[in-house]
Structure formats: C-alpha cells, structure tokens
Image (cartoon, rainbow, N blue to C red):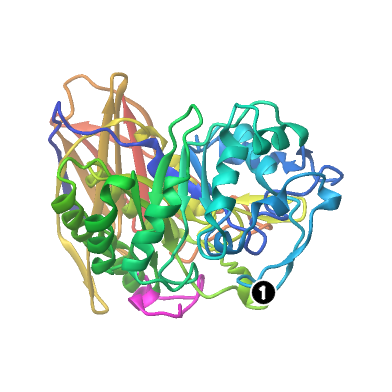
Amino acid sequence: MRRATITLQPKDDAPHIPADLYGHFAEHLGHCIYEGLWVGEDSKIPNTKGIRNDVVKALKELNLPVLRWPGGCFADEYHWKDGVGPRDKRPSIYNTHWGGVVENNHFGTHEFFELCEQIGCEAYVCGNVGSGSVQEMSQWVEYMTSPAKSPMADWRRQNGREEPWKLKYFGVGNESWGCGGEMRPEYYADEYRRYQTFVRNYGQRITKIACGPNTADYNWTEVMMSRATRFMDGLALHYYTILDQKWPPSGSATQFGEKEYRSTMHAALHMDELITKHSAIMDKHDPDKRVALMVDEWGTWHPVEPGTNPGFLFQQNTVRDALVAAVTFDIFHRHVDRVKMGNIAQMINVLQAMVLTDGPRMLRTPTYWAFHLYKGHHGAQFVPLTVKAEESNGEGHTLPSVSATASRTAKGWTVSASCLEPKECVTVSVSGLPVGVKVTSARVLTGPALQSHNTFDRPDLVKPKDLEVRFAGGELEFDLGPFAVASIELA
C-alpha cells in the first residue's frame, strides 16, 4: 500500500474556479446533434420541442454551465441563414468535414438556444470566418441579440422569437490555422480585428474569443497577443490527448494495456506545460490577465469503434478517460488566474462524450461521472495544495501516483483526488482542513479494470459509489484503489 499526503494551504486572496471550466462542445458531427440531441417533434423518443428529454435531464444533473456550437470545423462552412425559418423550407447541405452526410439544417439557431434554455446553460456560438463574410457574421449577431426594430431582429420575430437571446460568448472563427482557412497567424490577426469590429453589443456585452493556437504553436499566441490583445476577451487553445502524442490517433479506446494507459495519462498531463507556456506569452502582453485563455476543445481522441463511420468519431469511454478528465480539471484549477473556460469534445456520441445514445436508449459514460464528482468545485474558491507521494514508474513513463485539487465556499470544502496507479492502492491523508469539519459526501469512481466502460447491456458498470473515509490524528484519511477518482465534501 503506497501513501500520499495532501496538504491544503488556503489563501484568502486565491481566485475562484469559474464554473465555465466545466463547459461542453456540440458540433454537427456524427450523431452528436442528430439522434444525440435532436430527434424532432414527431419522434417516438420523448422530447420537448424536438430535443431529447433523457439527454437534457442527464446534462442538467451536471449543472452544465456553457455549451459551444456549431463547431469545430463545421462552423467555418456553416451559413446560419440556412438554419432558420420553417424546417421544411431549410436547404440541405453536404457535411464535407464529417462523414460525407447530408445535413438538413433542422437544428439551427432557434433550436440551439432552446436547448440552452432547457439545460439552463450559457450559449457560446462560433462564427464563420473561413467561408463566411463579415456581413454574414454581423447579421447573425444582430439576429440573435438585437432588441431593436431592424431587418435581422424583425426576421427573428417572424420566425417565432420575440425577445433576443442572451449570448455570453462569441468565437470569431475556429482553427483558422487549419480547417478554418489554413491561415498564417499574421493574416488571421488582421482578419480577427476586422471581423470582431462588427460583432456588435446590442444591449448586452458579448465576450469575443479569438482563434488561438494548435497545441504548442507558441508563435501563434505571440502574434495574436502582439497584434490583437486589445480587441479580444479570450484566446482559444485546442489540445487533444492522443496515444504517444502522435497524429493520427492509434491504439484503441477499449483494448489497451499498461503501456498505452501510461502514455495516454502522460499526454493528458502535458496540458499543464501547454497552459504554462502560453500563459507566459500572454502575461508579457497582458500582465493584468484581462484576456482569458479558453481551452474550448480538449479531451481524448482514440480511433473510432470498429464498424462505425470513420467521419463520425464515435469512440467508447473507459475509466482511463475519466482519469484524463479528472487530471485535466486539476490542471485547470491551478491556472484559474488565466484559464476561464474549458469545453470538452464532445458532449454526445463523439470523442470523449458525456452520453451515448442508441435509438431510445441512453447511457452515462465514465467521463460523465467524473464531471459529476467535480460539481462541488463550480464557482468555489481555489485552495492551493501540495501532494507528496511516490512516483509511479513503468513502461517508459513516470506519472504522479496521486493528482488532487481542492476548493471552498462559505458552506464547506471539496477535496478531489485521483489514484493514477494502474495496479497499486494508495492511502491518502489530507491536512489543513478546519477543526471540526464533518464529511457530508464521499464518493469514488472506478471499475473492475482500466478498460471498463458502460454499454447498453450494462449501463451502470462504471458509476460512483460511496467511499469510506476517516479522521486520524486530525487528518482526513481514505484508501484509493488503483485507477480511481474520488471527491469528498465537508462542512
């Protein structure tokens, strides 16, 4: 049995953890939107205004804070006017990026905001810079947010929405260095400055987010911060956890051993270095940290499940993926002075999904439950800490035995800890809690094996269970089995 010690070091001036770090991403890709979220009002699957009731219920239970849409690569070929008005009159298009399928545009602007209202989350819309015009983007913002009597606002009213929607975030293009236009950073910086000028504030302030770097492209961050800092509120970072950090993805989502597990976790932990180095560049140009770093695409990317459309990016979701989510949250928390939002890719049926659907059936993935365990951190004050534990060595990769994070509110404390050991148990001691606190909830997420995942035949194989905790010598103590994520709430 290994041992780990977590020492909490609360500070009164520590920043708070934005709930938006736990945001999600839904693209017109595979069965994320259609069948995953949208079934139509005539479907036999229970729905409200065409949106699946079971999925909405599951997402609401996560206190989902913000949802990014319509992409992704799809965003820079999406022309929003195709997705408003009577559905039977909306033109169909060909989805060139994802699976070569026909997109009927039945899920558009009105349906997206309806979804956000049903879930109770903020809206993050990504605009089309790659193949769209400044006018098109400007009119979309007017359509969504203007309360005035104007052409686009009047068209919105004709289409059934009298009041403007609340739009908290707007992304000016997506991956402009790649599928969004293969632009150089110098060129995109100028385009960003031009496009964002016409993202007007119609009585509500929109947070403008610029396309940021692909993984470790530090030059992109340098160029954007030197040329466009005063025009943006956020800079997006995209990073996917991929086996051996080599593209294209290899291995398997479910068939892997210790070597592949360690490589994947090593890649996930690389997020800390990326944020540190990009933040240092941002600090040079923005020492007051006004511009946020938004990690609006992150998560594991494995090869698709055998027999599925390669363009649909459908992968299973194991305990390994839940551990990737947990260590990513821990990293985000350590950087909340700069990182203000995260959006996992993607919400349903695509990549590291929260939920999988099959016709009328739905299941929650291990990653869903990792999000669920971390709800206590939403909006709470970050508590700095140190972890002392033996390192976990093997198969060419060294990992920390334990990853942890903590936060507090006026009502109590949340301490989360993950055992990254693939074979050994760890006894964890937590010091620095106030005298007299009591445990109100203690749960742990693990499975029979690292490869364990939920299926429609066994939808609850991996889900949180009660964790036994104790106080010894004034310290909180608990035992974590291998590959386990725990969260403990105290008051």
Count of number-bearing discs: 1
Report which quarter residue 79 is drawn in.
bottom right
The kind of secondary structure the magenta stretch mainly shows is loop
Residue found at x 30% / y 54%: 419
Residue 466 in view: no
Image quadrant in which the N terminus is located: bottom left
Residue found at x 59% / y 45%: 140
Q: Observer-nearest residue: 455 or 171? A: 171
Q: Observer-nearest residue: 143 or 337? A: 143
- Left or right side of 255 for 349: right
Q: What residue sits right under mark 1 in the picture?
A: 308
- Left or right side of 394 for 308: right
The verdict on residue 260 being magenta is yes
Q: Observer-nearest residue: 80 or 326? A: 80
In the rendered image, residue 280, in percent from the top left (x then y), is placed at 16, 55
Magenta range is 243-261
The relative height of residue 176 versus residue 378 in the rendered view (above or below) is below
Residue 280 in view: yes
Q: Residues within 10 Å of mark 1 (few under 14, many from 20)?
A: few
- Left or right side of 133 for 158: right
What kind of element bears circle 1?
loop
Q: Amino acid at mark 1?
A: Thr
In the rendered image, residue 479, in percent from the top left (x then y), is placed at 29, 46
In the rendered image, residue 9, in percent from the top left (x then y), is placed at 12, 35
Report which quarter residue 151 is drawn in.
top right
Q: Observer-nearest residue: 81 or 104? A: 81
